[in-house]
Image (cartoon, rainbow, N blue to C red):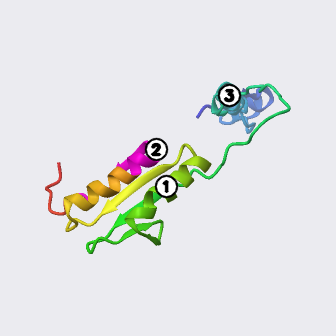
Amino acid sequence: MAAFIKSNSAAKTRSSRRGFSPMADINVTPMVDVMLVLLVIFIVTAPLLQTGVKVNLPQTRNTKSLPQDNKALTLYIEKDGTLSLNDSKVDAETLRARLEAIRQSNPEVRLYVKGDEGVSYGLVMQATAAVVASGITQVAFMTQPLRNTPPK
């Protein structure tokens, strides 16, 4: 830290010991420099923090709003062969009809298939055939990660 030393010529004549006295003014120049640098940083980065693209969409009279419910469906295949679609029981014959109705109302629907590991392969294939026949294209089969795998 620097300090300005002011010469005191009147004190010099009286006493040689008190020739210089420290100046007790605060130097604000470094603080102003830091504040200006921070201001420039904020001015430059503020426009970069805005997300999205501003688009002016065209307007029409005859519009059909799309369904906003893009919640994924879950098809459960239990060990005894029972099928459930989002917590409601369904049999194999009505599964296709229900999935078609859902796809008609929401073409972007996603379906997760959670099957018990003890379920026969034939039952899983019957459920998959019903899903494909309904026209749903976004299907994922859910699995569990291995429990006793060593960390990499």
Q: Secondary structure at mark 1?
A: helix
The residue lying toward the viewer, choosing from 61 and 56, is 61
Residue 81 lies in quadrant: bottom left
Q: Which residues are magenta?
A: 131-145
Is 15 part of what is drawn in magenta? no
Of the numbered discs 1 and 3, the one sitting upstream in the chain is: 3
Residue of label 1: 99
Residue at coordinates 26% horizontally, 61% vertically from top-left? 123
Neighbours of disc 2 within 10 Å: few (<14), some (14-19), many (20+) = some
Q: Position of residue 21 (x, y in %)?
A: 70, 35
Residue 64 appears anywhere in the view: yes
Q: Position of residue 71 (x, y in %)?
A: 55, 55
Neighbours of disc 1 within 10 Å: few (<14), some (14-19), many (20+) = many
Q: Real-space Cα distance between discs 1 and 3?
A: 35 Å
Q: Real-space Cα distance between discs 1 and 2?
A: 8 Å
Q: Secondary structure at mark 2?
A: loop
Residue at coordinates 45% horizontally, 48% vertically from top-left? 134
Quick one: quadrant of the N terminus? top right
- The residue mark sitting in front, 3 or 2, is 2
Q: Is residue 22 above or below residue 72?
A: above
- Count of marks placed on residues: 3
Which circle marks residue 135 in the picture? 2
Q: Real-space Cα distance between discs 3 and 2?
A: 33 Å
Residue 141 appears anywhere in the view: no
Residue of label 3: 53
Q: Secondary structure at mark 3?
A: loop
- The residue mark sitting in front, 1 or 3, is 1
Amino acid at pointer 2: Gly
* Mark 1 vs 2: CB contact within 8 A: yes
The residue lying toward the viewer, choosing from 25 and 120, is 120
Q: Is residue 106 above or below residue 116?
A: above
Amino acid at pointer 1: Leu
